[in-house]
Amino acid sequence: MEMMKRKFLQSLVGLFAVVLAVATLPLAHAEDETPDGLIKRLSSDVLDTIKADKTIRASDMSKVIALVDTRIMPNVNFQRMTASAVGPAWRQATPEQQKRLQEEFKILLVRTYAGALTQVSDQAISIKPMRAAPEDKEVLVRTEVKGGGDPVQLDYRLEKTPGQGAGWKIYNLNVLGVWLVETYRSQFAQEINAKGIDGLVNSLAERNKTNANSKKG
């Protein structure tokens, strides 16, 4: 049962990619776009893109991975996401260890999202009313994914980034009441307690290597 739930959640996590995958170019007025407006615009665009892209529907994993890597990750505060997933041990990690953790965690997420993208068909995303003040720097955008069964809760935490490339970036995702970062944090904590930071890095690297080889087979 637990394994089925985990696989289900991993598949749904890929819907995170759905709302972001069309952001290939910087927006001229990105700093003026509301976070719920961003999610709504990208949701509509990417669903249309996936439905029209035969290579994605045919599960061409190399192209899907490239899509996720180039279009999704620029819209994520990935350092914050990795640091939050690693937890308190992040502050004790060396700069090199932090770099490796980000690299391996990124590969893990990219392949997770890419696998789920190939399963997107007739889903539609509904944006719920957002409660936030104009001066808020962090917000919650709540959505529902509809199509082929009961609606799926899919919520995003975003932060306002200042300076060059200002705009909203995602740093956490909630699927059916389960926050992505917290889920990985519990897994990573076990690795760190048993084998330390280097043990976690090696474990992620080995998992990514296994996943890559399985896709080739």
Image (cartoon, grey):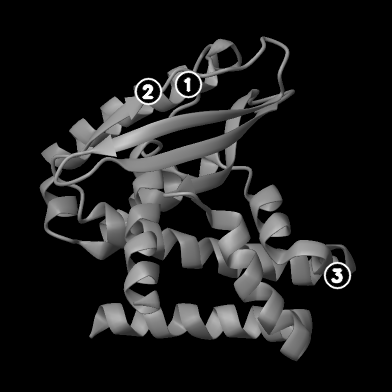
Classify mark 2: helix, strand or loop: helix
Image point (30%, 83%), residue name:
214
Image point (43%, 49%), residue name:
175
The percent position of residue 181, horizontal first and vertical second, equals 60, 56
Look at the image and tell me in which quarter the N terminus lies: bottom left
Label number found at residue 94: 3
The percent position of residue 156, horizontal first and vertical second, equals 51, 37
The percent position of residue 37, horizontal first and vertical second, equals 45, 17
Q: Answer above or below: position of 27 versus 105.
A: above
CA gap, disc 2 to disc 3? 39 Å
Q: Which residue is mark 2?
A: 40
Q: Number of marks in the image?
A: 3
Classify mark 1: helix, strand or loop: helix
**Residue type pointed to by label 1:** Asp
Classify mark 3: helix, strand or loop: loop
CA gap, disc 3 to disc 1? 36 Å
The percent position of residue 40, horizontal first and vertical second, equals 37, 23
